[in-house]
């Protein structure tokens, strides 16, 4: 099935429980499989008919007793999927011709006959399908592969959480791993957080006054969270019917968004592969944290985690396409004592050549030399 | 149903009263028709109700009310789309030729009466307030014109001689005289002209003349014509059922919370699953009244009447706009349309390529003020501000038609919104 972005749930359809100052989303899970399957089957029976008929059916029929208020989120997601796949016939040009002819004084019958002949369709078909290209009038087409109950449940959870987060007044997020993609997304959405990074622990992103900027930024982070090694999000939400903290953490049933790129370069991929082969007991964690320095923020490429739970190392592989970035990298080296800096050989000169934590490389990073630094 | 059958009930006229012999036991008599043992009897104005009851029961009957000429089976005013009064006559025809016109000019009253008389002016009786008006009407129209006092005095024999009763300037006549004329006339088609839509007066007239079908409000700016259209029978029943469901809950609420307003009612009903059907019924009733086939026909009639002029049709919903687009081939402008097509349509109307547009919301402000000749407010709406915005699309010499479903919540709402707009 083509990836379809589902809109966050509107406030009136949010289902949650407000208890002890927390907002607990009404998660959809395995127990919901029966009614989700029936819901999908009902939608399937409308294939080939206008989407508006299906929407009307859903509006008129009451909620499934097995689902209760949780049905709203599933309906929202399923209708978004079906809307995106519905097919319409192009009628815009025919409409314009018809209305112009009629305004020019041509009789209805004559105008219909002329336009129908020009578009090679029957007059009755033209009249019946005059607006069939509009979203609600498009015919339902079944997505391929077909919707599946658990996928629907996950997507509904995602839409629900994003709907709640749209009402966030403030938020803080701890991430360990995939920090750069999370921060980049927040920046691109205009919500710049306060960053509090530790070299060997989670990064804390804080939005003290989320307001309008976080209206779109925080929901946009939800599809990224399942890709984060470990996370914990606490957002103060002011909903029309309740207010409290929404707490999300690793393991919550959220749908993962599009898969982020595993490595930024072939150099990193080769390093990860060699490292795994030579030091199988160690673990690699991509983009573990954010480091703050005089030159701004830095995102080490890897965290190297020893097997016995000892203190980990950070590893930065700098391709240095932009040579002006070198001072910032060197400063990182000075500031963080457990950071290994891999630099292109031709950029390493003078003091750097003698620095114990600088690993020069030509075409690929020699893991043996890194191993010598970290003592693996 | 035939009116010359040899068997079944027989309708006659005696001294201003209708007499029915052989009333079928299975059919309940209309309210006001009394059982006197050998026959049923009531005011002559009940003639149409008697005929309606027998027609509904599909029973053959003989109507001998008019002894000299056979009664026409149906009143069909000569509407003629080029007549300025065509929309008003259309509304009257839908109301079975019984209704009240409010605010019409004198010339228009004569025009309406002419159209109603059609090819048989001898069957019409025009009742006026005094001899001055009698003289004027007789000069304009070759029909039987009598003053109210004279007509009331002769109604005991005159009442069975006409099929059309026209009462002009009812507010200028003493009520007992008007009542006597209306009660004693057996005319099936009845029309009254009143200067303004005073609810006290029209509610008294309703039994003898029918509902208000056309209200003209001509105070500055474009002239406003309110056309009150009856709903089709099936829609009427559905409306009544929905309204009853809503009222059941609302009455209980009003009894329990006398001071609370409608907004509180809606808020509380939303939160209570048991009461939600009442709220849905209210929405359904509004939806039914907002758009039905009689309104669609009326819009078609008005579009024909104003062919070539720049017309905006404000519909209650997108579906109604699409329906009009299919039936009348006028462009629908809705939020669903692609933005480029929407702007092309609005530009087309602005530069004269298109002569008519229909839509539920976007036309309220999407068209420049004063650039339309005619606006048709087909139903629905969101208050006085929206109504004012819509009316301002029409130039000062233009016309605004407001289509209102008869005997529904729309009647009062239209009056309130119009009053609120006029008060500003």
Image (cartoon, coloured by chain):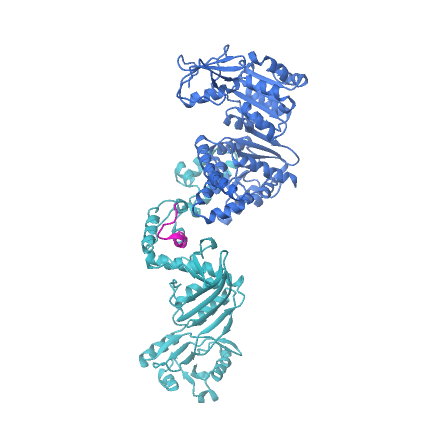
Chain colours: A cyan, B blue
Does B196 sit left or right of A187 as displayed?
A: right
Q: Nearer the viewer, residue B27 or B172?
A: B27
Residue B343 position, x and y percent, is 53, 47
- Specify the quadrant that holds the C terminus of chain B: top right
Q: Which span is picked out in magenta? A: A61-79
Residue B256 position, x and y percent, is 51, 43
Residue A94 position, x and y percent, is 45, 42
Q: Residue furthest right?
A: B132
B215 in relation to A244, above or below: above
- The main secondary structure of the magenta stretch is helix
- Specify the quadrant that holds the N terminus of chain B: top left
Q: Nearer the viewer, residue B361 or B370?
A: B361
Does B96 sit left or right of A268 as displayed?
A: right
Q: Nearer the viewer, residue B400 or B340?
A: B400
A323 in relation to A77, above or below: below
The answer to which image quadrant residue B150 occupies is: top right
Is residue A185 something one can see in this rendering?
yes
Question: Quick check: is A360 in the magenta stretch?
Answer: no
Residue A233 position, x and y percent, is 45, 67
* Number of marks: 0
Q: Residue furthest front?
A: B256
The answer to which image quadrant residue A7 occupies is: bottom left
Is residue B84 something one can see in this rendering?
no
B60 in relation to A231, above or below: above
B95 in relation to A178, above or below: above
């Amino acid at each position: 099935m083509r990836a379809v972005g589902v809109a966050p749930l509107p406030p009136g359809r949010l289902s949650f429980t407000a208890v002890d100052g927390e907002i607990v989303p009404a998660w959809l899970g395995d127990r919901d499989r029966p009614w989700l399957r029936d819901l999908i089957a009902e939608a399937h029976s409308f294939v080939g008919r206008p989407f508006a008929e299906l929407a009307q059916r859903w509006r008129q029929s009451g909620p499934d007793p097995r689902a209760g208020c949780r049905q709203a989120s599933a309906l929202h997601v399923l209708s978004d999927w079906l809307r995106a796949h519905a097919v319409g016939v192009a009628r815009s040009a025919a409409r314009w011709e018809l209305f112009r002819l009629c305004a020019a004084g041509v009789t209805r019958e004559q105008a219909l006959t002329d336009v129908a002949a020009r578009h090679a369709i029957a007059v009755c078909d033209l009249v019946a399908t005059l607006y069939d290209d509009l979203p609600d009038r498009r015919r339902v087409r079944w997505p391929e592969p077909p919707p599946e109950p658990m996928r629907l449940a996950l997507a509904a959870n995602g839409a629900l959480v994003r709907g709640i987060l749209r009402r966030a007044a403030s938020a803080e997020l701890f991430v360990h791993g995939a920090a750069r993609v999370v921060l980049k997304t927040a920046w691109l959405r205009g919500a710049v957080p306060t960053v509090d990074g530790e070299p060997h622990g989670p990064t804390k992103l804080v939005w003290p006054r989320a307001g309008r900027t976080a209206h779109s930024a925080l929901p946009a982070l939800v599809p990224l969270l399942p890709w984060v090694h470990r996370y914990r999000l606490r957002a103060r939400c002011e909903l029309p019917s309740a207010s409290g903290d929404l707490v999300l953490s690793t393991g919550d049933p959220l749908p993962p968004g599009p898969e982020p790129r595993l490595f930024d370069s072939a150099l990193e991929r080769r390093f990860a592969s060699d490292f795994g082969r030579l030091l199988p007991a160690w673990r690699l964690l991509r983009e573990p944290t954010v480091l703050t320095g005089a030159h701004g923020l830095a995102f080490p490429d890897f965290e190297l985690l020893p097997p016995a739970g000892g203190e980990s190392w950070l590893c930065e592989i700098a391709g240095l396409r932009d040579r002006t970035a070198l001072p910032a990298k060197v400063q990182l080296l000075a500031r963080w004592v457990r950071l290994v800096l891999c630099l292109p050989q031709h950029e390493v000169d003078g003091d750097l050549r003698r620095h114990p934590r600088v690993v020069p490389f030509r075409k690929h990073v020699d893991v043996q030399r890194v191993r010598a630094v970290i003592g693996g | 149903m035939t009116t010359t059958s040899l068997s079944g009930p027989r309708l006659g006229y005696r001294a201003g009263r209708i007499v029915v012999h052989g009333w079928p036991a299975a059919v309940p008599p209309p309210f006001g028709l009394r059982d006197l043992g050998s026959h049923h009897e009531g005011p002559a104005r009940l003639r149409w109700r008697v005929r309606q009851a027998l027609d509904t029961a599909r029973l053959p009957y003989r109507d001998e009310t008019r002894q000299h000429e056979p009664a026409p089976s149906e009143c069909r005013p000569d509407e003629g789309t080029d007549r300025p009064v065509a929309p008003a006559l259309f509304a009257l025809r839908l109301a079975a030729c019984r209704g009240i016109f409010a605010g019409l000019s004198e010339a228009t009253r004569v025009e309406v009466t002419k159209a109603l008389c059609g090819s048989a002016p001898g069957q019409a009786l025009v009742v006026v307030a005094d001899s001055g008006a009698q003289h004027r009407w007789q000069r304009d129209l070759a029909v039987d014109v009598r003053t109210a006092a004279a007509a009331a005095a002769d109604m005991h024999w005159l009442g069975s001689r006409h099929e059309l009763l026209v009462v002009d300037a009812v507010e200028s006549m003493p009520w007992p005289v008007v009542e006597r004329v209306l009660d004693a006339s057996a005319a099936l088609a009845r029309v009254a002209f009143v200067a303004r839509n005073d609810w006290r007066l029209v509610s008294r007239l309703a039994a003898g003349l029918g509902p208000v079908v056309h209200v003209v409000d001509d105070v500055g700016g474009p002239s406003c014509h309110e056309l009150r259209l009856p709903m089709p029978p099936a829609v009427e029943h559905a409306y009544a059922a929905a309204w009853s469901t809503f009222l059941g809950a609302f009455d209980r609420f009003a009894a329990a919370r006398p001071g609370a307003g409608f907004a509180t009612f809606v808020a509380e009903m939303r939160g209570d699953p048991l009461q939600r059907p009442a709220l849905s019924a209210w929405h359904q009733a509004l939806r039914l009244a907002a758009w039905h086939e009689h309104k669609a026909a009326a819009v078609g009639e008005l579009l024909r009447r104003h062919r070539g002029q720049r017309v905006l049709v404000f519909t209650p919903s997108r579906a109604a706009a699409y329906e009009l687009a299919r039936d009348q081939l006028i462009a629908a402008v809705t939020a669903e349309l692609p933005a480029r097509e929407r702007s092309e349509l609005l530009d087309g109307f602005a530069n004269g390529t298109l002569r008519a547009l229909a839509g539920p919301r976007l036309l309220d402000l999407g068209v420049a003020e004063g650039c339309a000749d005619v606006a048709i407010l087909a139903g629905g709406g969101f208050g006085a501000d929206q109504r004012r915005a819509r009316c301002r699309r029409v130039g000062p010499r233009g016309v605004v038609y407001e289509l209102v479903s008869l005997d529904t919540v729309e009647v009062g709402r239209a009056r309130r919104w119009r009053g609120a707009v006029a008060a500003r």
